[in-house]
Amino acid sequence: MSIEELEMLRKKARNTMLIGIITSIVIAIILFAISPFISLFVIIFGVIITIIINVKPTRNFTLAFKDTFVLKTLESVFTDLIYEPESGLDESVIRNTGMMYMGDRYSSNDYISGKYKNINFTQADVHIEEEHQTTDSNGNTTTTWITIFKGRWMIFDFNKYFKANIQVSQKGFGNSKLNNWGAKIKYKKVMMEDQAFNNIFKTYAQNEHDAFYILTPALMEKIKKLTSNISGSLLFCFIDNKLHIGIQNNKDSFEHSIFTKINAEEVTKEISQDIKLITNFVDELNLDNDLFRREV
Amino acid sequence: MNTVYILIAIAVIILIFIIWYISLSNKLNRSVIKIDEALSGIDVALTKRYDVLTKMIEVVKSYAKHEKETLFEVIKLRKDMSIQERNDANRAMDENFKKINIVAENYPELKSSENYKTLQQSIADVEEHLQAARRLYNSNVSLYNQLLVSFPTSSIAKNKGMTKKEFFEADEIKREDVKIDL
């Protein structure tokens, strides 16, 4: 699809949204003299109707945008690529690590799987929320959703074989979950010899030896460097010879607002930044170094 | 009545002191156990390294029958070795590994054989395990030695006759010095 056609789709979605909201506001102003309550109702109702009407135009634009820009950029970097913008990681993939609090509502999109430097990876945007209910003095119950995790979840083949599960969570990544009551797998807190690393991360492992085997001084340095270069907090889970990385940055990657004009150069740059987040882990952590890959 | 309160207060203070003493004593005991556990990790890694090196020497000898002048160090591993003996055994293994690489440089068919390549990969992994065991052991020894020089654990350790532990000083494998072809 050409940029012009994409712009037409974007403007259609934007205009539908603007017309709906402006119409709601105008009607609300007219009705304000009669009843402020009705006016408020009209605004809320109008916005909801506008969002519902706008679902299709926004979806059409988003899919076309991802097909035009994201897919092409991904194809230039990865092999064996599968990109499904409307699919995500199955909830069980994260749940089965046993290392993340899963809250009450889960959604995921922008599923990508492929190979980079011959390393298999999978990634998706993930949003985990927890339901909170509050009851006021009149007995009215209000439900709110608190975000537990919003960001990207990536899974890479790891280049060492290990038996024990290990978790490294950046302090401030508050929703990792281990050692809950009755858990089958018990973890020990491990203090690495690198005090600076211990100041930034909490490390838990089923056995200390594997933690020291995986977290070599060089890897710890690289993790520290990566952490300082990435906005958001990180969770590393070494499990079943895979490396799961959770990046909590409250961002929805590979998206473009319907209110922002498409500048091909800038858009490609932004998408490249989102892709670089994947490649950086392979490059910086030397995941393509297969010196230890063969089992002994 | 006052005397009773004073006696109760003294008893509580003594009880707190005993609990405190026991908890610090247990902390020291736990450190020793952690060191022993880490030491067994070193022994496992040393044994694995010894096994792989022995296999490598056999492979090298089968290819390099004319290299009679290459004398590999005789290494004997046994239970209850001191840290110094473990260090010595590990250094002897380093020497053997260097000799293996020197011989292998002269025999391209040896270097390209699948068996040798597999053993090279194994030795790299075994050495990573040895380094992990060394770092874990030394980290535990460091914490234990710190307890031995810090008050009040130093006094308790002295009463229990505890002394500083030696570090295991295996060198980090300098990969740039060892050419590994895979």
Image: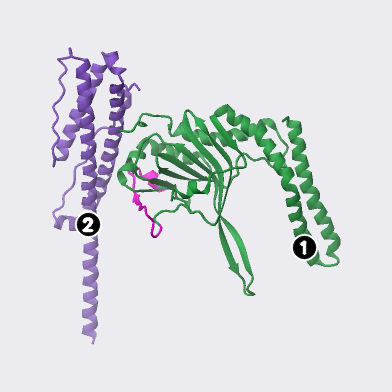
Chain colours: A green, B purple
**B17 over A197 or under it: above or below:** below
Residue wearing tag 1: A41
The answer to whether residue B149 shows anywhere in this view is no
**B40 over A178 or under it: above or below:** above
Q: Are marks 1 and 2 in contact (CB under 8 Å)?
A: no
| Magenta stretch bounds | A180-199
Question: Dot 1, how many residues are within 10 Å of its Cα: few (below 14), some (14-19), or many (20+)?
Answer: some
Residue wearing tag 2: B153
Q: Position of residue A95 (x, y in %)?
A: 47, 50
- Depth-wise, is mark 1 or mark 2 nearer the camera? 1
Q: Residue at x 80, y 55 (%)?
A: A24
Which chain does tag 1 point to? A
Helix, strand or loop under label 2: helix
Residue A112 in magenta stretch: no
Q: What secondary structure is the magenta-colored segment mainly? A: loop
Q: Amino acid at mark 2?
A: Thr
Residue A187 in magenta stretch: yes
